[in-house]
Image (spheres, rainbow, N blue to C red):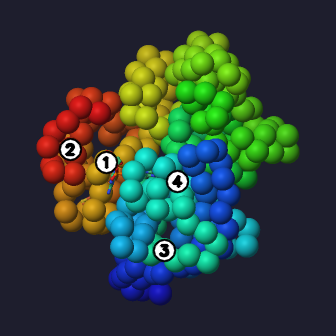
């Protein structure tokens, strides 16, 4: 297929049927569907999901299964995500994408730090890292046990592929007590990693960015901004001189340094107004 044809096909909405729904915790569900373009998603790429009659929102691709199906993992935070987490097998959604530039696999020892549904793009990355023989340590942080996601998948990866998986909860109800960033810092003091991959609340990403600078470690971080077109046209997702949908959502250390004055501090809301993160 010619490149232009591919871009057109990728950006035209395809209506797909939900073929599976898996609860991850009381607020988060993973929805499975089959789509020719989404099954080629790279770790870190996202799609635009149209919920008929409600909205179209950006969501990361959380897995590509051996049977060719793909998934999104959705936390209920508002109208569109509530409609999605209420969906049943057989319901229809529209998908465009995958879009953006994802994580690049580099180095032999990786530290993956995720919080909330930031774990969604990291799960597909972790599977890629394992297949490529990278030594992987994962830290997943949440406020409490009932907010952790992908517990079974991560436990399987630990058991079957030797991935070191560490959970942290702020209330101490599971795993280490405290913030994911605190555990990351204590690991970075003792061990050497080639790269850190992160996604989650932007305050967490900001702290990981500071740690990566302190310990001189390469970092790739997946960011979120308000998105409409997803193809670099409308400007809704601007951060510094970049558009997160086109130039991200995954940003390298060099680019993160350029947008330091925004990272974890300011963003533009749906009205284009500058608001605190
Ligand atoms: C690249 C990217 C990947 C994402 N991946 C995931 C994921 O894997 N799982 C997940 O649960 N969430 C993900 N999100 C966040 C998700 O898009 C929002 O939670 C969702 O749009 C909220 O819509 P709502 O109608 O339910 O809530 P609303 O009440 O409309 O909004 C709640 C908050 O969500 C954010 N939001 C709303 N609309 C948009 C939009 N069009 N673009 C960006 N942010 C918006 C705003 O910060 C808003 O304050 C991702 C966002 C981006 C930009
Ligand atoms: S969402 Fe339109 S430029 Fe990024």
Picture residue at 40% right of the left edge, 65% below the top: 48
What's the residue at 43%, 35% (across, down)? Answer: 201
- In the rendered image, residue 140, in percent from the top left (x then y), is placed at 61, 33
Q: Are the residues tagged 3 and 2 within 8 Å (C-beta)?
A: no
Whether residue 134 is visible, yes or no, is yes
Which residue is label 1 attached to?
Answer: 225
Looking at the rendered structure, the secondary structure element under dot 2 is: strand
Q: Where is residue 226 in the image (x, y as percent from the top left)?
A: 29, 51
Q: Do the residues labelled 1 and 2 touch (CB within 8 Å)?
A: yes
Q: Which of marks 3 and 4 is nearer the N terminus?
A: 4
Q: Which one is earlier in the sequence, the residue at label 4 or at label 2? A: 4
Q: How far apart are marks 1 and 2 (CA)?
A: 8 Å
The C terminus lies in quadrant = top left
Q: Vertically, is 47 above or below 114?
A: below
Marks 1 and 2, the one that precedes in the sequence: 1
Is residue 117 or residue 79 the one in the foreground?
79
- Upstream in sequence: badge 3 or badge 2: 3
Evaluate if marks 3 and 4 touch, with contact meaning CB atoms under 8 Å apart. no
**Mark 4: secondary structure:** strand
Query: What label does residue 271 carry, if any?
Result: none
Q: Indicate which disc residue 93 carries.
A: 3
Q: Answer with mark 4 or mark 1, whichever residue precedes in sequence.
A: 4
Assign a secondary structure to mark 3.
strand
Choose between 106 and 178: the one closer to the eye: 178
């Amino acid at each position: 297929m010619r490149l232009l044809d591919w871009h057109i096909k990728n950006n035209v909405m395809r209506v797909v049927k939900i073929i599976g729904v898996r609860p991850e915790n009381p607020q988060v569900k993973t929805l499975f569907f089959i789509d020719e373009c989404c099954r080629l998603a790279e770790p870190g790429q996202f799609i635009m999901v149209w919920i008929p009659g409600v909205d179209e929102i950006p969501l990361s691709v959380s897995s590509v299964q051996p049977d060719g199906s793909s998934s999104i993992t959705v936390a209920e935070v508002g109208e569109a995500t509530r409609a999605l987490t209420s969906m049943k097998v057989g319901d229809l959604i529209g998908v465009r994408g995958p879009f953006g530039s994802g994580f690049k696999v580099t180095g032999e020892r990786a530290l993956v730090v995720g919080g909330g549904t930031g774990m969604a793009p990291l799960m597909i990355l972790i599977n890629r890292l394992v297949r490529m023989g990278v030594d992987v340590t994962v830290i997943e942080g949440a406020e409490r046990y009932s907010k952790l996601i992908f517990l079974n998948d991560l436990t399987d990866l630990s058991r079957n592929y030797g991935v070191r998986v560490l959970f942290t909860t702020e209330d101490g109800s599971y795993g280490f007590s405290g913030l994911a960033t605190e555990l990351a810092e204590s690991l970075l003091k003792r061990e050497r990693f080639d790269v850190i991959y992160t996604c989650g609340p932007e305050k967490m990403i900001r702290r990981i960015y500071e740690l990566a600078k302190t310990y001189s470690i390469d970092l790739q971080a997946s960011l979120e901004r308000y998105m409409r077109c997803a193809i670099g046209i409308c400007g809704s997702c601007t951060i510094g001189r970049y558009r997160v949908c086109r130039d991200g959502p995954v940003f390298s250390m060099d680019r993160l340094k350029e947008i330091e004055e925004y990272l974890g501090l300011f963003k533009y809301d749906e009205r284009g107004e500058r608001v605190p993160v």
